[in-house]
Image (spheres, grey):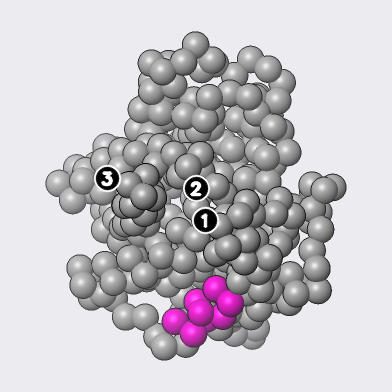
Amino acid sequence: MRSRYSAAGLFVLLATLWGLTFPAISVGLRSLEPVLFAAFRYDIAAVLLVGYGVARTTDWYPSAERDLAAVLAGGVFLVAGNVFLFVGQQTVPSGVAAVMQSLVPIATTLWALGILPEERVSASGAFGILLGFVGVGLVVRPDPSNLLAGDTLGKLLVLGQVASVSLGGVLVQRSRPMLDRAALSGWSMAVGGVILHAASLSVGEPFSLPATLTAQAAVVYLGVFATAVAFYIYYTLLDVRGALETSLVAYLVPVVATVAGVVFLGERVTALTLVGFLVVFAGFVALKRRAIADLVAGSTPSASSE
């Protein structure tokens, strides 16, 4: 019983750390260039996670082909792909950006259907995927005649980040890495950080360290707590509770982010955005209904896409 309460505490802590990511990005963007800001985040996390991997295991260096493939996929898609979130949040409220992240489990299933031969989806699962995209449509509400109007472009960039990180997760899974998870994450962040610094230079961002106290706090929070510490908690929950139960954190994160955005940043989230989030969650339930039923019954969830 105690271990279950401990897991629940870690679940809430992880949702809080990741939920506060979005307001922290909004605060940092007030004085930091978006691509460079993202690079700083992963510079810090890479040092901490690789260092932790070195300290805890001798298997910390990616030498096998499958490990190198996983590091590359993680660096390009899971890490560097987050630049779309940083750029998008220049115009998108943190709570809305967090709500859009709830599509990640559904997008991951969609990528897996095309990349992993063992993945299958039932009719109810296909309906769940469709519901997910309907929900995102309610959040984004694009104007086909002018996609650059308002914050639509920013929302589309956040969707680009969702597509990138979900693809990265599937590619890492396909690689079947044997490397220690902390080291794997750390090396992926190192690769992603290099890509982000190169991208920052290529778009003409001036290089400068965070000068204000709020910018410094945002970078430290994102690098240390929202990334390095959060990933350690995430992998701990994966080992203790399994992938399905851990994935449910994606639906608590927007709640934390929205409340924090309203309280600390004075943001507003429309009722239609909240409806869109509920539709996305309904899609997830339809997609994973059998695994959720197994979870509620206390048995091991099926490895299928449901």
Residue marked by disc 2: 241
Q: Position of residue 158 (x, y in %)?
A: 52, 63
**Nearer to us in this view, 265 or 233:** 233
Residue in the foreground of this view, choosing between 100 and 279: 279
Of circles 2 and 3, which is in front?
2
In this view of the protein, which residue sits in the foreground, 124 or 263? 124
Disc tally is: 3
Q: Position of residue 193 (x, y in %)?
A: 47, 34
Q: Mark 3 points at which residue?
A: 221
Q: Name the spot of residue 188 as percent of width and height, x first.
A: 53, 32
Q: Where is residue 205 in the image (x, y as percent from the top left)?
A: 41, 45
Q: Which of 20 and 145 is in front in this view?
A: 20
Residue 113 appears in the rendering: yes
| Callout 2 touching callout 1 (CB < 8 Å) | yes
Give the magenta range: 274-282
Which residue of the protein is positioned furthest toward the top in this rendering? Answer: 58
Q: Residues within 10 Å of mark 1 (few under 14, many from 20)?
A: some
User: Can you tell which of label 3 and label 1 is closer to the viewer?
Assistant: 1
Q: In which quarter of the image is the C terminus?
A: bottom right
The furthest residue to the bottom: 271
Q: Which mark is residue 245?
A: 1
Residue type of the residue flagged with mark 3: Tyr
User: Amino acid under label 2?
Assistant: Arg
**Cβ atoms at labels 2 and 3 below 8 Å apart:** no
* Residue 148, placed above or below residue 198: below
- From this view, report whether residue 247 is shown above or below residue 103: above
Residue name at image x 40 percent, y 85 percent: 270
Decide: few, some or many residues near mark 3? Use Cα within 10 Å; few <14, some 14-19, many ≥20.
Answer: many
